[in-house]
């Protein structure tokens, strides 16, 4: 199975009758069964890129080939939970009633640490809890392709680390493809099979990291890579 | 919190009744203009015992419910039309905006001419009164739906129909219920006026009749009963809204 391909993609927004270029000449392969991480500063077009791939946005130029993707899930930058549904109902929102495997859903709820809040409504949750509920909603959908837009941004260091581990576990088990947006270089190094640096709507550089089970970010190899990425991200 | 509020209400009501009683007792105004509280309570008890007050309440209430039901259905249907066929609304939107600015009571002469002074006229008045708040709020609820939530439905493969029932409708629910609550309040006020113009029974007619018989005490009983029944209805409806909108922050107005 091949992945998703972006060929020469360009996207413009019209603000006050002026065309603003948001993405330009994006040529990108999102390999199947791999984690691709988009790394970049705030406002560089990461969310826009994700929305294009998700099909939520039209674009003026180029082509996106993603015909074989059957079930895609999207963790939005905001939680986007339905305020009138309980946490559990929100998590099963993507599933039809007969598709719901209650044991599995309970497992996912436990994984994101919300078992005490199953019956709570989103207004009763903290920001990080809402974010975890929205991550759980994506996992519950059994996707073969997950897009995640800074999904762990509202979490503390330890919860974040644990969620990263869970994400890798799910990835290894289901072999789903993941497109992950972050602005944390460490997070990109922990998760990414492929790291794409986006700057002002242009792909600045790409790095591939071969699979090894335990990644030691303090090893020489990763320290060097981190340094190089930092150089890439520095504005000229 | 709640207890202190009802205590406060009780104190202010007691104060008003006290002042009323003192003024009536002093005899500065004739008892025809301002009957004493005792007199009012007396005639209230009499009307309860004979059951005539309940009959009037019942008649007025049934009219309100009928008209309210019809206008809710009509408002919902037209609002749906407007959401589903965006272009169709062009045909009736202008008329709706025009009728919105015409007080229903001003149409009563026409209604009497066309339908006589039977039930149709009175229910017609209620429909004309309750329709607009319900329609406008329902439309607002549907059209103001958060695009971000609709996108969630799009991602998870919801059809147009599916996303209507799972996202748009629940989202609009609080606005629809608020509109219904306002509409119900308006109907209750409108029926009294309508009954004062064209009716042979009901609370409005009762008040007018009492006035013609120079029974100011009965007029005051009528006014108090209207207020209390309207208040209880509104509270009950607020309770229903609370139960329906569990997760939502905005549960109508107070
Ligand atoms: N609907 C829109 N209309 C006009 N301009 C937009 C719109 N959405 C985004 N933009 C512009 O596109 C650019 C990229 O926005 P985008 O949301 O993709 O950034 P981002 O990389 O996700 O940033 P962040 O890390 O802060 O989330 C910004 O300059 C923004 O102003
Ligand atoms: Mg973003």
Image (cartoon, grey):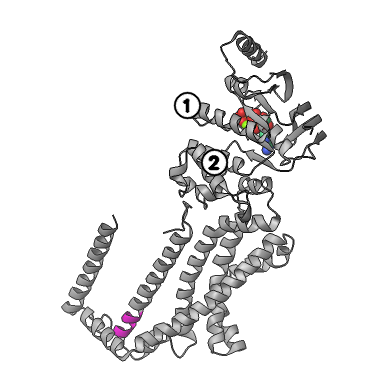
Stretch of the chain drawn in magenta? B216-222
Q: State how far apart marks 1 and 2 are (Cα).
A: 18 Å
Indicate the quadrant containing the C terminus of chain A: top left, top right, bottom left or bottom right. Answer: top right
- Tell me if B95 is positioned left or right of B32 in this view: right
**A125 vs B246: above or below:** above
Could you say where residue B169 lies in the image, as x and y percent from the top left? 59, 59
Relative placement, left or right, of A191 versus A14 is left
**Which sits in the foreground, A139 or B221?**
A139
Q: State which tag comes first along the sequence, 1 or 2.
A: 2
The residue that mark 2 highlights is A108
Measured as percent of width and height from the top left, residue A34 is found at 70, 28
* Residue depicted at 55% across the width and 28% down the height: A165
SS type, badge 1: helix
Judged from the image, the quadrant occupied by ligand 2 is top right
Q: In which image quadrant can residue A69 be found?
A: top right
Q: Disc 1 vs disc 2: Cβ atoms closer than 8 Å?
A: no
Helix, strand or loop status at disc 2? helix
Residue A158 is labelled as 1
Graded by Cα atoms within 10 Å as few (under 14), some (14 to 19) or many (20 or more), the crowding at tag 1 reads: few
Is ligand 2 within 8 Å of the beta carbon of the residue shown at mark 2?
Answer: no
Q: Is residue A83 left or right of residue B25?
A: right
């Amino acid at each position: 199975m091949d992945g998703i391909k972006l060929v020469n993609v360009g996207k413009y927004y019209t603000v006050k009758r002026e065309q603003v270029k948001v993405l330009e000449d994006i040529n990108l392969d999102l390999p199947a069964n791999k984690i691709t991480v988009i790394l970049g500063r705030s406002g560089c077009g990461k969310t826009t890129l994700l929305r294009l791939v998700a099909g939520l946005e039209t674009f003026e130029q180029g082509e996106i080939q993603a015909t074989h993707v059957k079930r895609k899930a999207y963790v939005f930058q905001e939680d986007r939970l339905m305020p009138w549904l309980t946490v559990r109902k929100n998590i099963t929102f993507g599933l039809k009633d007969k598709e719901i495997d209650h044991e599995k859903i309970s497992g996912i709820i436990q994984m994101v640490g919300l078992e005490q809040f199953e019956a709570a409504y989103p207004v009763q949750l903290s920001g990080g809890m809402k974010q975890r509920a929205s991550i759980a909603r994506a996992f519950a959908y059994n996707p073969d392709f997950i897009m995640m837009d800074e999904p762990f941004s509202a979490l503390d260091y330890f919860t974040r680390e644990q969620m990263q581990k869970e994400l890798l576990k799910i990835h290894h088990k289901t072999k789903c493809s993941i497109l992950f947006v972050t602005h944390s270089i460490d997070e990109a190094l922990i998760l990414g099979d492929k790291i794409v640096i986006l700057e002002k709507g242009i792909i600045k550089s790409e790095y591939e990291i071969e699979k090894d089970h335990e990644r030691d970010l303090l090893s020489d190899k990763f320290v060097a890579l981190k340094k190089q990425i930092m150089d890439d991200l520095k504005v000229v | 919190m709640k207890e202190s509020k009802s205590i406060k209400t009780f104190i202010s009501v007691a104060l008003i009744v006290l002042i009323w009683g003192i003024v009536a007792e002093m005899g500065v105004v004739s008892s025809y203009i301002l009957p004493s509280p005792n007199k009012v309570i007396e005639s209230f008890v009499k009307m309860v015992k004979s059951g005539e007050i309940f009959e009037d309440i019942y008649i007025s209430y049934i009219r309100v419910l009928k008209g309210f039901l019809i206008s809710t259905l009509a408002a919902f249907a037209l609002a749906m039309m407007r959401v589903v066929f965006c272009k169709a609304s062009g045909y009736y939107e202008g008329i709706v905006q025009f009728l919105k600015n015409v007080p229903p009571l001003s149409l009563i002469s026409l209604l009497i001419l066309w339908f006589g002074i039977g039930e149709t006229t009175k229910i017609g008045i209620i429909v004309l009164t309750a329709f607009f708040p319900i329609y406008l709020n329902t439309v607002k609820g549907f059209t103001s739906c958060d695009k971000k939530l609709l996108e969630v439905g799009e991602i998870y493969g919801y059809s147009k129909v599916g996303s209507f029932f799972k996202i748009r409708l629940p989202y609009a629910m609080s606005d629809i219920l608020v509109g219904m609550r306002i509409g119900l309040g308006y109907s209750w006020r409108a029926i009294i006026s309508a009954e004062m113009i064209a009716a042979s029974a009901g609370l409005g007619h009762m008040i007018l009749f009492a006035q013609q018989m120079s029974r100011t005490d009965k007029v005051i009983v009528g006014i108090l009963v209207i207020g209390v029944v309207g208040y209880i209805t509104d509270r009950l409806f607020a309770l229903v809204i609370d139960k329906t909108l569990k997760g939502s922050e905005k549960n109508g107005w107070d």
